[in-house]
Every structure is written in C-alpha cells, then in structure tokens.
Amino acid sequence: MRDTVSALEGSRIREVANEGLGREGVLKFWFGESDEVTPAFIREAAIASLHEGETFYAHNLGLPELRAALATYTARLHPTQAGQGLPDRLAVTSGGVNGLMLACQAVLDAGDEVVAVTPVWPNLVAQPLIMGAQVRRVPLRPGVDGAWGLDLAELLAAITPRTRLLVVNAPNNPSGWTLSADEQRAILAHCRQTGTWILADEVYERLYYAPTANGCAPSFLDHAKADDRLIVTHSFSKSFLMPGWRLGWLVMPPGLTDAMGKLIEFNTSCAPVFVQRAALQALARADEVTPALVAHLKTCRDTLVPALQALPGIEVATPLGGMYAFFRIHGQDDCLDVAKRLVREAGLGLAPGSAFGPEAAGWLRWCFASRDTGRLLEGVDRLKRWLRL
C-alpha cells in the first residue's frame, strides 16, 4: 500500500460512534445527516424506475433530463449563470464526496500545492493528500462569542502562483462560518491573477438562515464566469433529505466537462438510473421540500443553541448556515475523550472537533437536524447532568 494511504487518519467521528455500538438509548447527533426519512414521492420515483426495468448503465455525465433540470435549478438560484452554457458544464456524480474526489483528480498532480480553509470536513484535506499534493492549512479562528471567522488577508497571502488549488467549504462544516459575497469576489479575483483553481464545496448553500433573495448562501457562482477556474460541488444529501442515495453534481468550466466524463467512467461509470429518477422528482418539488426543511432546521437551531448558551462554561455561537452547533466546554480540552465519555456516561453522541483538524481541538459538533426538538432538549439535559450543573 502507498505510504500516503497508510498514513491517512481514520475518522474520529466513527471512532466515537463505535463507542455507542450495543448501547441502548444513546442520542446520536454525531453524523451530518437528518434523522428524517427521504420524502415518499422521491422514494416512489426510484421504485417506479426499478419496476420499469431501468437497471442499466447511463451516460457518464448523467441523464440528459437530470442535467437539464439541474441547469434550470442552478440558473434560478444563481441568475448570473443563465446563458453561460448550462447544462454542458454539469456532471452528475455518485455523491458529493465523489464529486470532490473527481475534482481533485481532474486538476491535481503529485507535488502540487493546495491551500485549504480549515477546520473542515476531513475528506476535503485527505483527498488532495491521496493525490500526492501538499496541503497548506489556513485556519478560521473563533471570536470571543464563539463565532468563527476568516482573516481574508491571511488567506490571500497564502495563495500564490505556486498554489494549484484552493479548497473552501462554506457554509462550513463544522463551524457554520459562511463567506460573504465581498470575500468571494476578492478570492475569485485573486485566484484569477495567480492561476489557482477553486474547489468550492457548497453542499450546505440552501441550509442558510439569513434572509436572501434567492434562498441560499452566497456562492462563487454569483460572481464567476463560465471559464473561470472554478469547480462547485453540490449534493442531494442535505437539502433534499437524501444522504444514503449518494448523488451529487459538479458545476465546472466547459473545457473540463469531457475530461470529467472520462474520470467518472474510470471511477464509477455512472450514477444509478433509479437514483437519478428520484433526483428528478426532488428537483421538480424543490420549492416544497427544501424551504420546509430549512424552516424546521432553523427551529432546531433556535431550540438547541440558546439551551446550550444557558449552560455555564459553554461557548457557542448561532450559526448562519449548515446544520451544526459547534461549541466548547471550558476546562474540557480533550474533545475526543470527552465525546467518548459522553457516549458511555451520558448516552449523548457528539462529534469531536479534532475530527475536523487541529484548529478545532477542544470543540464538539452537534448535528441539530432532528425531527423532534424534544430530543435536542433531552440531549442538553443529559449534558447538563454530566457536567453536574
């Protein structure tokens, strides 16, 4: 096995989840998914496709009708992209994580320099490492109120003509930090000068709680031209309650599309047709599914965060985007140990901040995507009892 692969760190979230194996009554908030099942009409579309016998290979880049629907959806959310060659700049992928890996395969060679804004979901820094690239981390930092922020000047100084790729996830997992439109414009302009590719993980763009005209977080697509060195990754997992379906998509420059089709062939060949049929139904009723989901998630956020803020010694800010409360307990610096003890001693399953990078050591991530807000309050009560407050 390659040394690079052998050296990859295992998931610390899985390590904590393993503590809960065989334990009854654990409240599980460690994974980044809702506990709400995919809407019935989406599931039924997949079932109908299977009944029709659609069990064969599809086009590498996805069903033409799904790519057309994604083009319409993208142009509606980001009107500046209308007339810029969609859907010929789209590829359907077998999950958002597959899209991220494909993007790295498309633009990185061994030895290339990558700048990543961290802390972040660990796959985003592991994938460039797998390609043999060198990753330089530019950290977000928590303020006195627990909200994380970016030093834009520090990031721009780190991106030089030697930098092949910038990796940025906003809204951010785990912190909820979100780039502003002005920051995106500045980053895009700087990367045009240095010739740096941008890989923007925007899978949480619809899970955004500030009022906006288009119902989503600021996106690089609001400012980019079709031929910019920009690859944007999306997923059906978060905004459409489809995490286990493993379906995502990429928006990229037109010159990359054919090559991306080749990479898909060499990785997965194509996404399953019945899953793509389900996605078509999800997009057809997106205005029904996603706004209701976001409204519920906002209720969950506004239930959990104030309850945590009321506990002495806990530092947590209200996130603008995503589905996580990111907090720390003063005096409890070993977050992996704390997370394991919470499972064993309190029946509370959280993700350790160190899973997302050394910048987040001492922090804990709580996924608040719960059907029942009562489960969130019960979790806070268990934490309170564990802290002996």
Image: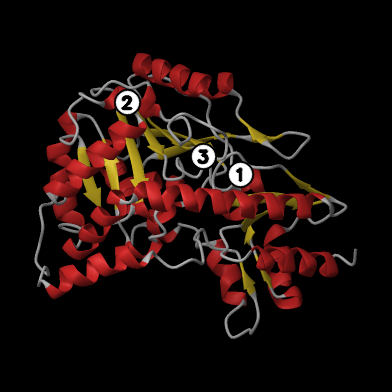
Of residues 159 and 46, the one nearer the viewer is 46
The 10 Å Cα crowd at callout 3, few under 14, some 14 to 19, many 20 or more, is many
Of residues 356 and 294, the one nearer the viewer is 294
Of residues 332 and 316, the one nearer the viewer is 316
Q: Which residue lies at the image location 17% right of the left edge and 28% below the top edge?
A: 85
Picture coordinates of residue 366, whole percent (x, y) = 64, 57
Residue 171 has which mark? 3
Of residues 181 and 51, the one nearer the viewer is 51
> Tag 3, which secondary structure?
loop
Q: Which residue lies at the image location 61% right of the left edge and 44% below the top edge?
A: 175
Residue ranking furthest to the front: 288
Q: Is residue 121 visible?
A: no
The 10 Å Cα crowd at callout 1, few under 14, some 14 to 19, many 20 or more, is many
The residue labelled by disc 2 is 79
> Tag 2, which secondary structure?
helix
Name which quarter of the figure residue 275 lies in. bottom left
Residue 175 has which mark? 1
Residue 187 has which mark? none
Picture coordinates of residue 370, whole percent (x, y) = 58, 63
Amino acid bearing label 1: Ser
- Residue 10 relative to residue 299: left or right: left
71 is higher (above) or lower (below) than 375? above
Picture coordinates of residue 103, whole percent (x, y) = 29, 41
- Residue 215 relative to residue 230: left or right: right
